[in-house]
């Protein structure tokens, strides 16, 4: 991850709210409705977050008219930015659903 891109993306209005809302895979429409942002702004922010490797496409669903709808999921759960002594980033990754199931299954064994 490019630290400058990450800081710029996180500094954009609505970006943090979008990442918070996208902890599970969701279509853009659902994310922007929950955040309360216009759809065009939502698409721009998601593109910016995707370029900074903070959000990713995590599946697809089918629309009522048969078209594909991408599902977006935040790649991070927690972000720490440290400016003391230079720019330093630390993240806790957002595990994919399948990874979570494997972890739960391993704990049950």
Image: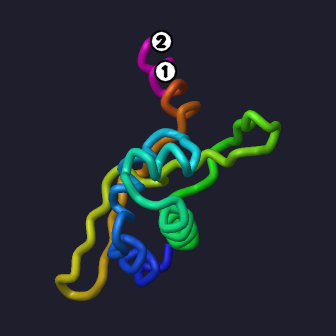
Q: Which residue is mark 1?
A: 106
Q: CA distance from mark 1 to mark 2?
A: 5 Å
Q: Which residue is mark 2?
A: 109
Q: In front here: 66 or 98?
A: 66
**Residue 98 picture location, percent across and down:** 58, 31
Q: Which mark is residue 66?
A: none
Give the residue drawn at x 44%, y 47%.
Answer: 33
**Residue 1 picture location, percent across and down:** 50, 73
Is there CB contact under 8 Å for labels 1 and 2? Answer: yes
Q: Is residue 22 left or right of residue 57?
A: left
Q: In front here: 29 or 10?
A: 29
Q: What residue span does the magenta drawing correspond to?
A: 103-109
The outermost residue toward the top is: 109
Q: Is residue 87 left or right of residue 65?
A: left
**Residue 31 picture location, percent across and down:** 47, 48
For mark 1, give the secondary structure.
Answer: helix
Q: Residue 89 appears in which quarter of the rendering?
A: bottom left
Image coloring type? rainbow
Give the residue drawn at x 74%, y 34%.
Answer: 64
For mark 2, give the secondary structure.
Answer: loop
Give the residue drawn at x 52%, y 72%.
Answer: 48
Give the residue drawn at x 54%, y 48%.
Answer: 29
The outermost residue toward the right is: 66
């Amino acid at each position: 991850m490019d630290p400058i891109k990450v800081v710029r993306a996180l500094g954009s209005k609505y970006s943090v709210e979008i990442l918070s809302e996208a902890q599970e895979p969701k279509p853009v429409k659902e994310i922007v409705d929950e955040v309360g942002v216009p759809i065009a702004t939502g698409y721009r922010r998601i593109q910016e977050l995707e370029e900074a490797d903070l959000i990713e496409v995590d599946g697809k669903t089918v629309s009522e008219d048969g078209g594909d709808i991408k599902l977006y999921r935040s790649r991070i759960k927690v972000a720490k930015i440290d400016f003391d002594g230079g720019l330093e980033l630390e993240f806790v990754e957002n595990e994919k659903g399948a990874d979570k199931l494997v972890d739960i299954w391993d704990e049950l064994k």
